[in-house]
Amino acid sequence: MCPQPTRLFILLAVLWTSAAFAQAPPAPAELDMAETQSQDEPPAPPVLLDPETSPEPLPALEPELELEPERPAAPPSPTDEATPAAHAADALPGFIDGLAEGLRREHALAGLGLAVVRSGRPPLLLAYGQADLATGREVDPERSLFRIGSVSKTFIWTLAMMLAERGQLDLDADVNGYLKSVTVAPAFGAPVTMRDLMHHRAGFEDSVQVFSVGDDDPRPLAQLLAAHQPRRVYPPGARTSYSNWGSALAAQVLEDAAGRPYEDLLRAELLEPLGMRDTDWSPPARLEGDRAAQLAIGYRPHDGGLGAQAYMQLGAYWPAGGMLSSPADMARWISFHLGGGELDGVRLLSPQMHARLFSRGFTDRPLGADLAHGFQDRPFRGQRVLGHGGATSAYLANLMLVPEQGLGVFIAQNSGQSRSLVYTLPEQILEHALGLSPPAVLYAGERAEAGALADVAGTYLNNRRVFSSFTAVFAAFSPIRVEAVSADTLLLHQGERPQRFRRVAEDVFESAGGQRVAVLRDGGSVVGLADGSGVHSLERVGWFGNPLSLLAGFALSLLFGLFALFGALWRLGRTRSGGAVDAIAVGAGLIGAVSVLALLVCGLLLAVAMDATGPADLVGNYPLPQMLWMHYAGWAQVIAAGLMLLTLAPVWTSSRLGLLRRLGYSLFTVSMVFLAIQLWHWRVIGAAVV
């Protein structure tokens, strides 16, 4: 569901350790921008049910024409006549075999299951590798169960449209009018609607607490939602910010509007009518008998091989990402949506309402990536691709639909160390099935004047982050730096592999891989970017909110603190001629130095603790003690900064220190005060440690 905590903590430690030598802000690791990356594993905010976490920003799908928000063309039925390109795809199974097995071995993945649905053809079900390495049990695409992560959300959104068609739910009404046991807190003078939730535009900050709930937690979803309600940081509709909490809230709205438990709705309204008999939401540890034998075991790298990984627990939050399914069942789910709401003569949504499901509720970036009532909607190489990705610890999944071509792909794997296969293979299947040539690499050429495009350059932070509690500081270590290298080209720095985007329309830029970035403006001024996944927006930050300011404050404080310590050691045993003011100033400086070192040590201890903590370990252990230690170290630094500030005037008026020592003490004091302000801004202090 946003950065992965372990990686963020490690990055935090490394950056702080080298802060004194930092010359430039760290390049963001993903533009999607999680969901988005140019590496195998994108660093994302502390959310583990991530739909967009791809090795590169999820390709933004591009339509030939503007997308109409309410009345798009109805998708073809699986029985419609397929395109000539699709009919020519007889070599598709062999093509997939070569790619899948090669990628699986390259990335040392345990196993994967695949379903390809094409109009007028039986579903293509494929499997590779093992579901259980210990016994050698192979993946069976008909029966093997994978956790599908945030692909589970597509069931929430489909049920929402079904209730709306029956008149039980108004997508544009205040959700508080349906909720019975939880109330969305007022903010911005505007209510949150189901349409806002479906497009991840309700304005909620992110929350890690969703992942701290055990499967044996007896609290119902409504109680958890009330206990963990995140702050609303943007007006509804203003920004796209992926929210697992908001998706779980949508499931609660459906339950209260229908007067039936969500699991009953899911089973009776979707799974049973569609014949999805192997789709379940039981936690893996609770599966028994034949159902347990169907589960593909989740794995992680261990001792030079793969070892079983503990399951991520979600408790009552499971509607947002806790479902299990087989490739065969997901082929039926794809066929239902390619059929415009009908499968095997069973119609659950009218063609008109299903067309609304696949339409966009907001029209502010028609040529960029967005959401279509919960489904990621991306322009990709002249095609409109809808779908969703998902990740729950060792399980990764991806659902991709090309309605206008009658094509759909589902893929899942049971080891999560590499995201490359589940995101690149579906795209390659699409290209092969539709006869598209491989994308060309963009020529860099010479840099030129950026002109008006210079306004887009700057530092950005993903809006899928925490704003009001301790974990807000993690966002400081995943910035995205945008550089304008010519009048029509942007360079987005993500880790060590920046991505080049060329202008394809006004305020819309596309990479060689087909992903798009759209510029967001307010009154003509650039305020952010919309990434290629459709579920994130990036906010432009000024110098004070730039993570480099936090690192600079820490680096300077650490540098002056080390000077103070070395100076005190050098003067040991020497005759002192100063008075009380001098002694107090020296003591305050030493306290300041120790406080900064304590902050560094606590950060390193937190990094070590998080490196040893997997997603399944958060239950019952969150927040970690090391988070509290770092929080308290932050307060100690603030107290030291205040003490130094109080002694600054006497140092200049009453001390016997030399001019250079007084100047050094003054600079140390200023850096300490600035660091204290930055710690407050990034919520290391002055906020709940959650």
Image (spheres, rainbow, N blue to C red):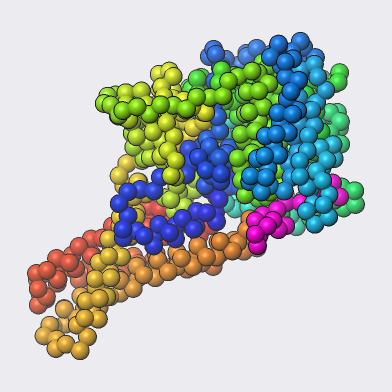
State the residue lying farthest toward the right: 289
Q: Is residue 664 above or below residue 471?
A: below
Q: How many marks?
A: 0
Residue at (36, 70) in percent of width and height: 597
Using residue 125 as the reference point, say whether residue 590 is left or right of it. Answer: left
Using residue 386 as the reference point, say whether residue 645 is left or right of it. Answer: left
Q: Is residue 85 above or below residue 585?
A: above
Q: Is residue 419 above or below residue 209?
A: above
Residue in the foreground of this view, choosing between 349 and 613: 613
Q: Position of residue 622 (x, y in %)?
A: 59, 61
Q: Is residue 189 above or below residue 672?
A: above
The image quadrant where one finds the N terminus is top right
Using residue 480 as the reference point, say whether residue 109 is left or right of it. Answer: right
- The quadrant holding residue 64 is top right
Q: Position of residue 134 (x, y in %)?
A: 80, 57
- The quadrant holding residue 652 is bottom left
Residue at (62, 49) in percent of width and height: 417
Residue in the foreground of this view, choosing between 547 and 678: 547
Q: Which residues are magenta?
A: 293-310
Asked if the magenta segment contains residue 180, the reply would be no
Residue in the foreground of this view, choosing between 252 and 125: 125
Q: Position of residue 188 (x, y in %)?
A: 46, 36
Asked if the magenta segment contains residue 302, the reply would be yes
Q: Position of residue 121 (x, y in %)?
A: 81, 19
Using residue 103 as the reference point, say whether residue 2 is left or right of it. Answer: left
Whether residue 90 can be seen here: yes
Residue at (45, 64) in percent of width and height: 603
Whether residue 218 can be seen here: no
Residue at (55, 21) in percent of width and height: 381
